[in-house]
């Protein structure tokens, strides 16, 4: 097994701020950072190896030059992990499926949220009320956002899967770990009338109407998610807590690599020190590979099934 830590990429956002400092990162005081792309091979936010034989090389280069160590997965690196720390509302948005994303020569964008922190009585925008495409278009045209958008209550430790076609938005001070396909296609439908550089940000009304699933899909929120939180054709996610686990983490499903993100505490993984915010990739796996996680750690581990 080869494990290497990753230096993340940080993205300024109109809704960002300084809250990523509380997640273990050092954010410049003059920057409104909204996202840390902590495990990424995407050109819009590339990660680089922080140590080991590949130190200084991009995740993309490592993956493409060593496919046999990553389960011989072909094509581009398929996953992206972010930490979002909004201090204002994110725009209300939707992502396309694989078929609709073809015009961008990209993946469709299913994603998911694990809530790392949030205020009391926090809510996320997660769905809509329109029964037909016509009704959706009319409610958007009339700015009937209160009637259209569905808000759901969330607490720390909750998990939500956001399939393509699901209207959604993160709200102020809800910090989320986001696991998604490695796609950066976002259709913005509502942005609270904000200005960026003196101009309203671009909306994508026509693409939103085409991409949105109508009527909306009812997907259950997992409260106090733990262990194998979620697994689908795109990605799987596991929460390992040293206070609750008595054995090393072993492979649950056949995969080519594991993605590791520390969300609480300090400790060791396979003898190496880890602190809050540390992220790494473990590749060159076999059926007996395991992660020996000790100390006082909460770790989110993600992968794709092969």
Image (cartoon, rainbow, N blue to C red):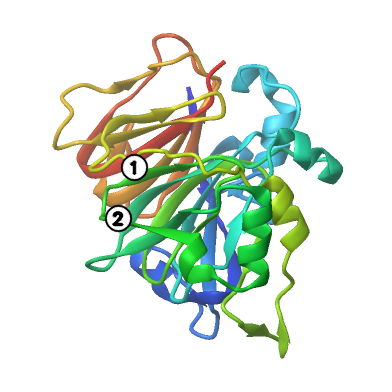
Horizontal and vertical percent for residue 230? Answer: 39, 30
Q: Which residue is mark 2?
A: 154
270 lies left or right of 105: left
Residue at image location 60% in from the left, 44% down from the top: 214
In terms of depth relative to the viewer, which is nearer, 120 or 266? Answer: 120
Based on the displayed image, in which of its 4 quarters is residue 85 positioned? bottom left
* Alpha-carbon span between mark 1 and mark 2: 9 Å
Residue occupying the point 49% across, 54% down: 129
Which residue is more in the foreground, 5 or 37?
Answer: 37
Residue drawn at (74%, 72%) of the image: 202
Secondary structure of the residue carrying numbered label 1: loop
Left or right, 193 with respect to 22, comes to right
Q: Earlier in the sequence, mark 1 or mark 2?
A: 2
Horizontal and vertical percent position of residue 251: 39, 17
Image quadrant in which the C terminus is located: top right
Above or below, 85 against 271 in this view is: below
Mark 1 and 2 residues: CB-CB less than 8 Å, in contact? yes
Is any part of residue 101 visible from this angle?
yes
Q: Which residue is mark 1?
A: 221
Q: Nearer the viewer, residue 209 or 138?
A: 138
Q: Which mark is residue 9?
A: none
């Amino acid at each position: 097994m080869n494990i290497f830590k990753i230096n993340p990429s940080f993205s300024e956002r109109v809704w960002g701020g300084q809250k990523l400092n509380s997640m273990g990162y050092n954010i410049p005081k003059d920057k409104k950072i909204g996202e840390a792309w902590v495990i990424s091979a995407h050109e819009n936010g590339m990660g680089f190896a922080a140590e080991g034989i590949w130190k200084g090389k991009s995740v993309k280069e490592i993956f493409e030059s060593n496919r046999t160590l990553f389960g011989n997965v072909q094509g581009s690196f398929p996953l992206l992990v972010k930490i979002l720390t909004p201090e204002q509302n994110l725009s209300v948005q939707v992502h396309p499926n694989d078929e609709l994303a073809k015009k961008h020569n990209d993946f469709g964008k299913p994603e998911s949220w694990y809530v790392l922190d949030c205020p009391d009585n926090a809510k996320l925008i997660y769905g809509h009320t329109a029964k037909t495409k016509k009704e959706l278009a009319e409610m958007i045209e009339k700015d009937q956002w209160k009637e259209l958008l569905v808000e759901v209550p969330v607490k720390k430790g909750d998990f939500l899967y956001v399939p393509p076609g699901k209207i959604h938005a993160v709200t102020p001070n809800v910090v989320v770990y986001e696991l998604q396909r490695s796609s950066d296609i976002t259709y913005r439908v509502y942005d609270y009338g904000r200005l960026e550089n003196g101009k309203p940000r671009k909306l994508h009304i026509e693409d939103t109407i085409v991409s949105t699933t109508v009527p909306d899909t009812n997907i259950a929120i997992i409260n106090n998610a733990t262990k194998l939180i979620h697994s689908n054709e795109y990605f799987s996610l596991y929460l390992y807590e040293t206070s609750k686990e008595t054995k090393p983490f072993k492979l649950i499903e056949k995969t080519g690599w594991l993605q590791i993100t520390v969300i609480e505490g300090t400790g060791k993984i396979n003898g190496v020190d880890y602190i809050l915010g540390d992220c790494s990739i473990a590749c060159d796996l076999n059926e007996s590979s395991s992660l020996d996680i000790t100390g006082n750690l909460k770790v989110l581990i993600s992968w794709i099934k092969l």
